[in-house]
């Protein structure tokens, strides 16, 4: 029996995603650099670029959540074992976060205006302990004293707010998996509830969780999306126009960003698909950029400018991210291969 063209296309696309022959590394890298760029405006006391109702950095984080939902759903479907799934997710997030927490705390000892014995007190140990538990603490004592225009600008890790939420999304997906993720309406119902909450309350957790679940649903309905992409495109454009006319800019943003992210990421573009040739630097950029940028802005000779400080921040952050990938993240991810031996199916 021969496959239909649509089925063959779907199978090929899924194989490319499974093998990593796609643009997702590049899209993640761009998103991480956009977060960095947005924060550079903020740390210089300038307004961050914004689209619809969100800043450039917030929009880039939405891209991260969409991709995460799409690829993590694939991971669950491929191996729906609760312990192995959670450990795979922990291996991706926690080792690099743990090293970054300790490294930033150590750097703070050099940057603080306090005597060392005062710096190494309760507040610093709380910074370490809570960040290791996915309970984000942003300040270190005496490091980057508060500035007049925004007390929050004294943070050493301003982008880490999304990491506990990312892990919560993994737990939500595991829960959905246990109660019936393969019944796709369950995930669609959860997404609908979150979209309503995000649209009315503008709360952070429902907003980004909705983007994560959008990626999950896109993975579940990928065959239908490919088969009916023409009608879906027409319907999507019409809905975006209606949303803009009604002033529902967040809805329009969601309608555009989810398919655009997944179409760009799922493609296999020569050159672009090789963005990970030096490693997947996106997470390292995300967790170290804020500290590097603070140092660049604070210690820049004279008055720092965006044109002068941004390239320096990008280069230094990428160098640190490269070290994080090769020294911490990649070795940690190698442990995934042992999970089936440590937690065999009969132990589920």
Image: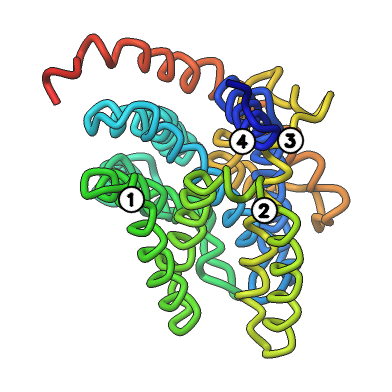
Which residue was labeled with disc 3?
267
Which residue in the rendered view is the most extreme toward the right? Answer: 307
Report the mark closest to the observer, 4 or 1: 1
Report the mark closest to the observer, 3 or 1: 1
Sequence-earlier tag: 2 or 3? 2
Sequence-earlier tag: 4 or 2? 2
Which residue was labeled with disc 1?
183
Which residue was labeled with disc 4?
282
Seen at 44% across and 38% down, the residue is 72
**Helix, strand, or loop for circle 1?**
loop
Q: Which is more toward the observer, 264 or 119?
A: 264
Which residue was labeled with disc 2?
228
In which image quadrant can residue 5 be found?
top right
Sequence-earlier tag: 4 or 3? 3
Label 3 – label 1 distance at C-alpha: 27 Å
Report the mark closest to the observer, 4 or 2: 2
Whole-percent x and y of residue 315?
75, 33
Sequence-earlier tag: 3 or 1? 1
Label 2 – label 3 distance at C-alpha: 17 Å
**Helix, strand, or loop for circle 2?**
loop
Whole-percent x and y of residue 157?
50, 49
Which quarter of the rendered picture does the C terminus lie within? Answer: top left
Report the mark closest to the observer, 2 or 3: 2
Q: Which is more toward the observer, 304 or 120?
A: 304
Q: Residue 297: tell me if it is visible.
A: no
């Amino acid at each position: 029996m021969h496959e239909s063209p649509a089925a063959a296309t779907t199978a090929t696309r899924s194989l490319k995603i499974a093998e990593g022959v796609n643009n997702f590394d590049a899209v993640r890298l761009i998103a991480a650099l956009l977060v960095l760029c947005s924060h550079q405006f903020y740390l210089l006391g300038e307004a961050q670029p914004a689209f619809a109702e969100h800043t450039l950095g917030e929009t880039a984080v939405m891209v991260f959540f969409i991709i995460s939902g799409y690829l993590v759903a694939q991971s669950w479907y491929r191996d729906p074992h609760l312990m192995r799934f959670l450990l795979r997710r922990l291996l991706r997030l926690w080792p690099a976060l743990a090293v970054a927490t300790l490294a930033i705390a150590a750097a703070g000892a050099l940057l603080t205006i306090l005597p060392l014995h005062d710096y190494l007190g309760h507040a610093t140990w709380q910074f370490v302990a809570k960040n290791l538990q996915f309970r984000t603490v942003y300040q270190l004592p005496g490091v980057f004293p508060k500035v007049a225009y925004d007390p929050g600008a004294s943070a050493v890790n301003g982008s880490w707010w999304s990491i506990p939420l990312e892990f919560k999304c993994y737990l939500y997906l595991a829960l959905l998996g246990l109660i019936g993720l393969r019944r796709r309406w369950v995930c669609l119902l959860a997404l609908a509830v979150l979209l309503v909450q995000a649209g009315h309350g503008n709360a952070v957790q429902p907003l980004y969780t909705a983007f994560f679940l959008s990626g999950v649903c896109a993975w579940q309905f990928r065959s239908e999306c490919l088969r009916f992409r023409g009608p879906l495109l027409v319907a999507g454009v019409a809905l975006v126009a209606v949303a803009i006319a009604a002033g529902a800019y967040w809805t329009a943003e969601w309608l555009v960003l989810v398919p655009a992210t997944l179409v760009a990421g799922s493609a296999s573009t020569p050159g672009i698909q090789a963005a990970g040739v030096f490693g997947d630097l996106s997470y390292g950029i995300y967790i170290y950029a804020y500290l590097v940028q603070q140092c660049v802005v604070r210690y820049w000779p004279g008055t720092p400018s965006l044109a002068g400080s941004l390239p320096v921040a990008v280069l230094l952050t990428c160098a640190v991210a490269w070290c994080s990938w090769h020294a911490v993240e990649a070795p940690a991810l190698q442990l995934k291969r042992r999970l089936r031996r440590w937690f065999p199916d009969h132990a589920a």
